[in-house]
Image (cartoon, grey):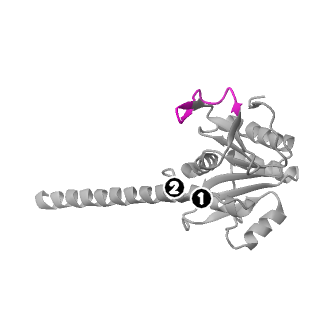
Amino acid sequence: MTVEFHILGKLKAKNPTVVVGLPGTGLVGSIAASYLVDSFDFEFIGYITSPEFAPLASIHNFRPYPPARIHYSKRNNLVVILSEMSIPISVSGDLAKQILKFAKSVKASKIISLGGISLKGNPKDVFVVSSNEKIASQLLGTKKFKPIKEGATTGVTGVLLTQGVVEKYPVVLFLGEANEDYMDPGASANVLKALSFYIGTDIDTKKLDKEAEEIMAELRTSLVKSKTVKRGREGFGGMYG
């Protein structure tokens, strides 16, 4: 076994929803999952190890944590599995299987994976894919989400969806339209709004929305500066060329 779950104590959860947030396009999954944990009274209940994982520790509020870990909120009946490091392709399949095994062991009602996708469309779009046709139909019927007719999703989420279909287990994937060149808190806020709608829990994303505005402002400033420099160089060439 290359991936192991380590649960600290006994998890007393009754049919919780398991939310998964892993690095990917725009770091959407990791940002969204970490924000969710910070927004509510989540307890650190476990961690995930593998010989293939990078040797590092995450530090939050002066306290070190394993980079791949598990949190639980009794009030919201949510388990969050997140990683703040890239998951090696070599263990993606095993990690997905262990997530599904863990979800079944706590009799989770479903697994919801949060992530990003870059289709160069509307930045507020959220796409949905599910191993359960009824769930997918219900969500798409609200007109709040976009379908993906053709394509592929790789890594842990890809295996989770496939296993969900094979084992008839409800796996839902929310993908926010994200920029693949930098971290995208705006897309993270959008998938959290999708999660909020789906599970009926109010999630305040104002901080993420503000971060998104600040990043866009910085990008616009950088773009203006680069254009100014470019025009200056072109003028220099024209004058002395």
Q: Mark 2 points at which residue?
A: 207
**x, y percentage for residue 57?**
57, 30
Question: Quarter-wise, where is residue 146 in the image?
Answer: bottom right
Task: Identify the residue at horizontal 82%, vertical 55% (top origin).
Answer: 170
Are circles 2 and 1 on residues that touch, CB within 8 Å? yes
Q: Residues within 10 Å of mark 1 (few under 14, many from 20)?
A: some
**x, y percentage for residue 19?**
72, 49
**x, y percentage for residue 215?**
43, 55
* Between 38 and 213, the one nearer to me in the picture: 38
Residue 55 is covered by the magenta coloring:
yes
**Does the rendering let one see residue 151?**
no
Number of labelled discs? 2
Judge whether 138 appears above or below 115 on screen: below
Amino acid type at mark 2: Lys
Side of 235 relative to 165 (left or right): left
Provide the residue span drawn in magenta: 47-63
Judge whether 100 appears above or below 201 on screen: above
Real-space Cα distance between discs 2 and 1?
8 Å
Question: Quarter-wise, where is residue 137 in the image?
Answer: bottom right
Task: Identify the residue at horizontal 80%, vertical 57% (top origin).
Answer: 131
Q: Mark 1 points at which residue?
A: 204
Residue 19 is covered by the magenta coloring:
no
Q: Residues within 10 Å of mark 2 (few under 14, many from 20)?
A: few
- Secondary structure at badge 1 equals loop
